[in-house]
Image (cartoon, rainbow, N blue to C red):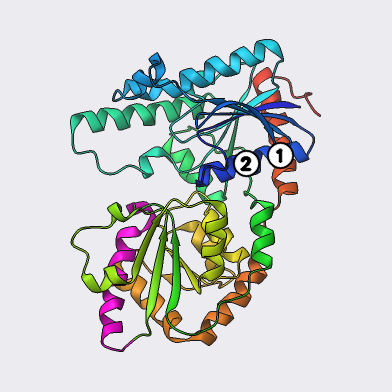
Amino acid sequence: MRTALLAWDYPPAPSGLSTAAREIAESLAEAGADVTVFTLDRTGTARVGGVTVVGLGLPPAGRLARLRIWGSVGHLAAPLAFRRAVLAAQARAPFDVVEATNWYAPAALLAGRRDLPLVTRSSTPAAFTRGPATTLRDRLDGATADALERRQARGSAGLIANTAAHAAVIARAYRLPGRRPDAVIGLSLPPEIATSARDAPYPAAEAPVRLLFVGRAEPRKGFDALLAAVALLAAEQERGEVPPFRLDLVGVPPGDLPADLPAAALERLHARGRIDAGALAAAYAGAHAVLAPSRYESFGLVYQEALAYGRPVLACAEDASARAFVGVPEAGPLAAAATGPALADALRPLLRDPALRRVYRARALAAAGRFTRASLGAETLALYWRAIAAARGDDTVSP
């Protein structure tokens, strides 16, 4: 099978979507597919990990780059670039299927084609990651992004969700009447992460207790509640009620910290911004626990990474993925809600009790490795064949 995968960025770019794109692409290649990745974060063509990577970086002075800076209509720039590149490659050597994320709809202008079935693998919808719209321009901009995502989802011959709970969310978000995503397929972890995780010893118990957050400074990630919890616990630590602790914030630049953060809390935070894969591996290896209090995750790669390293995970019961991947194996405490007091209540025992951290570590290791490249590749190819059959109206299509 010859398949195209549309990606906003691709490793070594450090993002969750980038990591997911590589796992999808290389798992398909390992399963025998001929995979071409089209990505906007670079130019040129390279062969990496058995995958052809085609860079579609927009020239700054080009028409699409200029279009991209406009509100609302600017969301069409990337879909236009992807459409142009995919159809040009399709004319030279046809693809059997094309896959794209739902996030900001990179394949919106490829949806509904019988000659090139589209599969959409749903991450978190853009509406869940934006801040509140305070101006008419913001509202129009968000409405356009949402409409393009719905167009792409409704025009897809196949839909993939990362979890069953996420499938239900996607069906509601895109108003898919009588239809839910056609497959639930969990994402694997990169082999180098799994290898380094297996070899990473657990840090010694001496203070300070080292905590790690990996994500963006946004409400969906529970970042506001996390800072509120740190402020509470920092005050308690100064009174001697909890041991000293430090929280590394990966993916959060210093400028994203609020100006009114109490000094005691600020002293315990280290905002590291975006870091490369080696530094991220070292951050996981050096942490006593990982704090991931998201209100919503489509899958939760941070949960999977933390479990692979055997790190206790503090998560939030508001998120279905956290309940499934952290709560069920009891790999860490679940805060009842994404609020400062609730997170502080859940974190306090972890700070005070090294033995409890060890118990959670053992459970985390036992729960790790649930998703593999072999399962990701095989299940994705099976869905591709069903999507091709659906697009052609031919149930006899098969490998």
Residue 153: percent from the left, percent from the top? Answer: 50, 30
Label 2 vs 1, first from the N-terminus: 2
Determine which quarter of the picture holds residue 59.
top left
Relative to the observer, which residue lies in front, 246 or 322? 246
User: Residue at 53% of width from left, 70% of height from top?
Assistant: 286
Secondary structure of the residue carrying numbered label 2:
helix
Secondary structure of the residue carrying numbered label 1:
loop
Observer-side mark, 2 or 1, equals 1
Would you say residue 361 sits in the magenta stretch? no
User: Residue at 44% of width from left, 70% of height from top?
Assistant: 211
State left or right for residue 342 relative to residue 87.
Answer: left
Residue 49, numbered label? 1
Image height of 386 relative to 86, above or below? below
Image height of 69 relative to 162, above or below? above
Residue 124: percent from the left, percent from the top? Answer: 46, 43
Q: Which residue is under mark 2?
A: 22
User: Residue at 68% of width from left, 68% of height from top?
Assistant: 199
Q: Amino acid at mark 2?
A: Arg
User: Residue at 77% of width from left, 24% of height from top?
Assistant: 397
Q: Which residues are magenta?
A: 218-241
Relative to the observer, which residue lies in front, 118 or 291? 291
